[in-house]
Image (cartoon, rainbow, N blue to C red):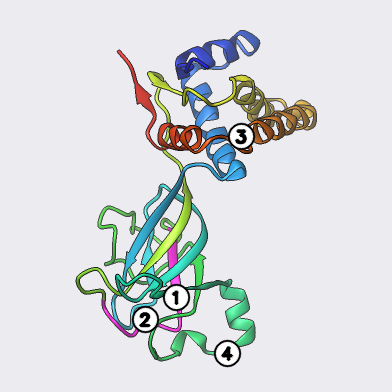
């Protein structure tokens, strides 16, 4: 299937919504792209957290959307790692009063995500740290006892990510059709501009996503690799 340029998808969308400005349409496409990547578990990446002894929280880059798995990697030896359990700060507070005052005793065994942090000196250096709530952090319980040296120990996060498209980018070649994008943009447009139509548009969009999910089941390894490669890095053509 030939790749579709983002500008062509937006032009098609605007035929049904001529009052929608192109910049807002592009925002709708990218907002739906984030939702689509999450729902179909596309745009996977492994993000490595370099640890600092006795430091609980670490700022994540803005492109990390959702962490699905986390592994404490003790060394480069095959199998020298273990999975961390996901937990919320609410559960930690409920189960262990004073958990933030815990002392380290080796590698952590739980992780959580939060949107505030007192630790603003950690990676990445470009993360927004101007006010509470401006950055997402990953936290570990108990505190890491060791600082990463020569790559270990560290924590590998498996996550979905969002890389916004521009007008000149192309949707991956073997993504099955443009309808799912149009339907998703229509849903978000209705939510913003015509709430009375949102329910109907949401139903249509959900059906399109389910259809795409069915078509993506069981592709060949090469197809899957091509899809993910294109999904990570929107291609520009001249």
Mark 3 lies on residue: 216
Q: Gap in Å between the C-alphas at discs 3 and 4?
A: 45 Å
Mark 2 lies on residue: 144
Q: Quadrant of residue 75?
A: bottom left
Helix, strand or loop status at disc 1: strand
Disc 1 versus disc 3: nearer the observer: 3
Are the residues flagged by discs 3 and 2 in contact, CB closer than 8 Å?
no
Q: Sequence-wise, which precedes: disc 4 or disc 1?
A: 4
Please state the extent of the stretch shown in magenta in the rendering.
136-147
- The answer to if 143 sits in the magenta stretch is yes
Direction from residue 146 to residue 186 in the image, left or right: right
Q: Sequence-wise, which precedes: disc 3 or disc 4?
A: 4
The circle drawn on residue 97 is 4
Are the residues flagged by discs 2 and 1 in contact, CB closer than 8 Å?
yes
Residue depicted at x 61% and y 8%: 15
Q: Sequence-wise, which precedes: disc 4 or disc 2?
A: 4
Q: Gap in Å between the C-alphas at discs 3 and 2?
A: 39 Å
Mark 1 lies on residue: 140
Q: Position of residue 168 (x, y in %)?
A: 38, 18
Are the residues flagged by discs 1 and 3 in contact, CB closer than 8 Å?
no
Q: Position of residue 203 (x, y in %)?
A: 78, 31
Please rate how many residues cluster around mark 2, counting C-alpha atoms within 10 Å: few if below 14, some from 14 to 19, many from 20.
many
Disc 4 versus disc 1: nearer the observer: 1
Helix, strand or loop status at disc 2: loop
Q: Gap in Å between the C-alphas at discs 4 and 2?
A: 19 Å
């Amino acid at each position: 299937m030939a790749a579709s340029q983002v500008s062509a998808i937006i032009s098609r969308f605007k035929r049904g919504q001529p009052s929608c400005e192109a910049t807002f349409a592009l925002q709708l496409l990218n907002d739906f792209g984030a939702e689509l990547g999450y729902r179909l578990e596309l745009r996977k990446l492994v993000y490595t957290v370099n640890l600092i002894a006795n430091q609980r929280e670490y700022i994540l880059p803005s492109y990390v959307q959702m962490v699905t798995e986390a592994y404490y990697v003790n060394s480069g030896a095959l199998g020298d790692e273990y999975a961390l359990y996901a937990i919320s700060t609410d559960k930690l507070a409920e189960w262990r009063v004073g958990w933030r005052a815990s002392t380290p005793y080796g590698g952590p065994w739980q992780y959580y995500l939060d949107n505030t942090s007192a630790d603003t000196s950690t990676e990445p250096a470009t993360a927004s740290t101007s006010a509470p709530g401006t950055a997402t952090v990953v936290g570990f319980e108990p505190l890491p006892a060791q600082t990463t040296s020569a790559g270990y120990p560290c924590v590998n996060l498996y996550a979905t990510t969002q890389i916004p498209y521009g007008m000149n980018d192309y949707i991956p070649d073997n993504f099955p059709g443009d309808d799912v994008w149009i339907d998703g943009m229509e849903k978000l447009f209705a939510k913003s501009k015509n709430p009375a139509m949102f329910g109907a548009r949401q139903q249509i969009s959900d059906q399109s996503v389910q259809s795409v999910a069915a078509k993506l089941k069981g592709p060949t390894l090469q197809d899957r690799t091509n899809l993910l490669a294109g999904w990570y890095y929107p291609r520009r053509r001249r």
